[in-house]
Image: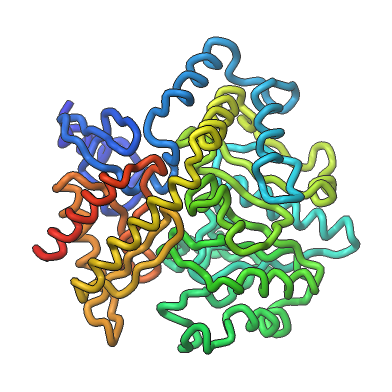
Amino acid sequence: MKTEEIVAKQKEFVMPCTPLLRQPLVYASGQGALVKDIEGKEYIDCFGGYAVVNMGHCHPKVVRAIQEQAGMVWHTSYDYYNLPMTRLAEKLAEVAPSGLKKTFFCCSGAEAVEGAVKLAKKYASRHGRLGSDMISLSGSFHGRTALTVALTGQKKYKKGMGNLVGFPGIVHAPVPYCYRCPFGLDYPDCGVRCATFMEDIISFQTSGDIAAFISEPLLGEGGILVPPEEYLSTVVKIFRSHSALYIADEVQSGFGRTGKMFGVEWYGVQPDVMTMGKGIAGGLPIAAFIAKSEVADAFEPGDHSSTYGGNALMCAAALANIQAMIDEQVTDHAMNTGKVFIELLDDLKSKHPIIGDVRGKGLMIGVELVRDRKSREPAVEEAKKLRDMMREKGAIIGAGGLSGSTLRLQPPLVITEEQVKKVCSTLDHCLQSL
């Protein structure tokens, strides 16, 4: 079958709820940071399937682990035990931020976030509170299920969903978005107002009985928003003074994406609960949340479960994926290659006025386009056009963010410096054409 036929059949048989502007590209194979379409054309993948394929497409160690486990046992359910889940849980306690020890396995990032919130509520109950309120950020993204869309701070994911996405007790705080500060201030003279404003949020928008504050250490879907260095520690200190837990949503920023194993490590903050997904197994459907023992033990038998959680095949793949990251020192590679990437993008910014902001850590990078640097009017159509032009020239990138004008560059962490330079050269050419 050809691309056009596959696109037509999916329009006929697949629900129309997936992204509106799906790319007319059918993946046929991949290796490392390269993929080929069904017609045999090769591309440099700079999007990684929503920042998922962290160790590259078809990493041989992960492929081998899948093949070996597939010949033994796939599924057991939580009623029984299996070896891969045991080993993976132990490994996660080893690589996670200090203090996080006990893990629950599930299938998607949204499910992990729901479970983490449920645990926070149960922990509050164990300490004689209702835990009525949850605080998340405007501009955030936490998933597509009812609760996680309610936590998500973006209207476009809630439109037409009625009160399904309006859970009581969820409050959204101002996003730490320095390029478009919600307070109209400039960092660092702002005193990090987006952080200190949390006291106002608690005083005027909550009951004061807060189960947890949840945030992505770096906001991915929001356009690769990197908070000020002191933001997260300031906010977490405020919430802990109100007996609230901190849930770090590392579904997108975890597993080497930012140049550290987890994005929260950049900010010197220890989460009470942390969610994981996407890069944990390089694209296989597995996710998890991990918590400090005293928090995890708030759960009692029967409080939570998942039919496919801890699936032996997925756990074996995740374990191999994480071990490959460690053995190949991929976090260091992501940090170093990311610095080169950002330097080249900054050079393009000095050359092309349409680039308003370049930001990111490691290989989690955003390039925000504007029609005018003074007014900062978002260049939405230009971003879409550039994404299409880049694809046509053999480079896959994302386009989105809160204003819809941010190019998202989140390649497999094994991308080479040579490939990065080629992508930037292609982007330069496309910007000139645009």
Going by the image, does 203 lie left or right of 192? right
Q: Can residue 285 be seen in this view?
A: no
Residue 89 in the image, given as x and y percentages of width and height: 69, 34
Residue that protrudes farthest toward the top in the picture:
71
Looking at the image, residue 161 lies above or below residue 192: above
Looking at the image, residue 387 lies above or below residue 45: below
Residue that protrudes farthest toward the left in the picture:
433
Q: Quadrant of residue 83?
A: top right
Residue drawn at point x = 34 percent, y = 54 percent: 409
Going by the image, does 363 lie left or right of 252? left
Residue 268 in the image, given as x and y percentages of width and height: 66, 62
In front here: 67 or 214? 67
Looking at the image, residue 327 lies above or below residue 110: above
In front here: 382 or 269? 269
Residue 131 in the image, given as x and y percentages of width and height: 78, 64
In front here: 199 or 34? 34
Looking at the image, residue 266 lies above or below residue 101: below
Residue drawn at point x = 26 percent, y = 45 percent: 418
Q: Which quadrant: the N terminus? A: top left
Colouring scheme applied when the structure was drawn: rainbow
Q: In which quarter of the image is residue 372?
A: bottom left
Q: Which quadrant: the C terminus? A: bottom left
Residue 266 in the image, given as x and y percentages of width and height: 58, 60
Q: Can residue 210 be seen in this view?
A: yes
